[in-house]
Image (cartoon, rainbow, N blue to C red):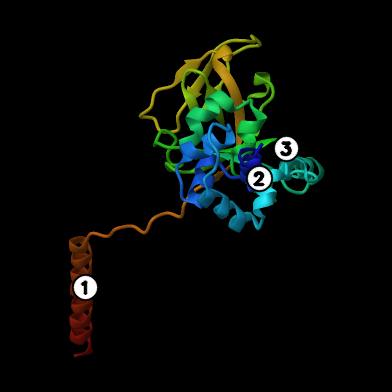
Amino acid sequence: MSLAGKNLRHLRKSRGWTQDEMAQQLGIKRSLIGAYEEERADPRIDVLEGLMEIFQLSMDDLLLKDLSQAGSSYLDRRRKLKMMNEDRAVIHFVPVKAAAGYLAGYNDPEFVDELNTFALPMLAPGDYRAFEIIGDSMLPTPSGSVVVGEKVENLDAIKNDQPYIVVSRTDGIVYKRINKPAGKSKGGTLTLISDNPSYPPYTVRPEEIAEVWAAKMVISKPVEKPVWDINHLANVVNSLQEKVSTLQVNRGGKSR
C-alpha cells in the first residue's frame, strides 16, 4: 500500500504550510491536496515529482517509507522548541481568510499547528496569538493591522478600558475595549467598546466567549504618503511669492 498521501500530509506540516500553500507549491488545486491526504485519491506522477524536487526525496521515500516515523517529526521539534526556548515567543497568526475556520478549530492543536508562525523577541514568555483585523471600528488603528495578544485564561483578569481580541460564537473575532460590570458581581455581561465613536458599544455574555487575548502589540503598515491638492499647493506658492515681492519692495523703499 502506498504511503504517498500520508507522507504528503507530513511533509506539508513539516514546512508549516496550509493546504492552500502546498497546492500553490505544486501548482494544483487545494481540493486535490485534501483528497491525497485523506487517501481518497493517489497523487499523480507530476505531483510526486514535485514533492521529490521540493523535499529532495526519492520516489521510494515517498511511496514506501513512513516519513513521520523517520526520527522526530518537525512538529514535535517545534513544540519542544516552543517550550524550551524562553527567549522567543512563537506566535500563531490568524489571517482574515482563516477567521471562519478558526472559530471551529481554535481548540484543535492540529488546526492551530497549520497556521503560520512568527516570533517577536521583545515579548516576554507567554501564550500569544496574532489576529488580522479589518474595518475602521478601532481607528486610529488602521484596517489590515495585526494585533498580537496574550491569552487571558480567566475573564476575571480582564481590565476595564483595555483593548482585547475577543473570539465569540456570535460575533466571530473582534478587536475591542472591554468594560466589566460594576461591583464585585461575576458572570455578568461584558461591554465591548470601539475606539471609533461612530460604532456604538454592545454587550456579550460570558458563555458566548470562546477566547480572549489581551492586546500587547499592534503591527501595521507604514502610513501612506499623503496626496496633496495641486491647486492648493499652487495657491500656497503664489501667496509666498507675493509676500517675498512685498518684502523686496519694502526693503527697496527703505534703502532710498
Residue reaching furthest to the bottom: 256
Mark 2 vs mark 3: in front: 2
Please state which of the two labelled residues, at mark 2 or mark 1, is closer to the viewer: 2
> Quick one: label 2 or label 1, which is nearer the N terminus?
2
Looking at the rendered structure, the secondary structure element under dot 1 is: helix
Q: Position of residue 135 (x, y in %)?
A: 40, 36
Distance from the alpha carbon under mark 2 to that under mark 3: 40 Å
Classify residue 202 as left or right of residue 108. left
Say what amino acid the circle numbered 1 marks: Lys
Disc nearer the start of the sequence (3/1): 3
Q: Which residue is mark 2?
A: 63
Q: Picture coordinates of residue 171 (x, y %)? A: 46, 22
Badge 1 is on which residue? 243
Place residue 83 in its image quadrant: top right
Q: Nearer the viewer, mark 3 or mark 1?
A: 3
Gap in Å between the C-alphas at discs 3 and 1?
61 Å
Q: Residue at x 65, y 39 (%)?
A: 2
**SS for tag 3?**
loop
Determine whether label 2 and label 1 are within 8 Å by CB. no
The amino acid type, in three-letter code, at marker 3 is: Gly
Name the amino acid, label 2: Leu
State the residue in front, 161 or 106: 106
Mark 2: give few (<14), some (14-19) or many (20+) Cα within 10 Å. some
User: Pointers 3 and 1 in contact (CB under 8 A)?
Assistant: no
Label 3: how many Cα within 10 Å (few below 14, some 14–19, many 20+): some
Q: Quadrant of the N terminus?
A: top right
Q: Which mark is residue 126?
A: 3
Judge by depth and name the residue closer to the eye, 250 or 197: 197
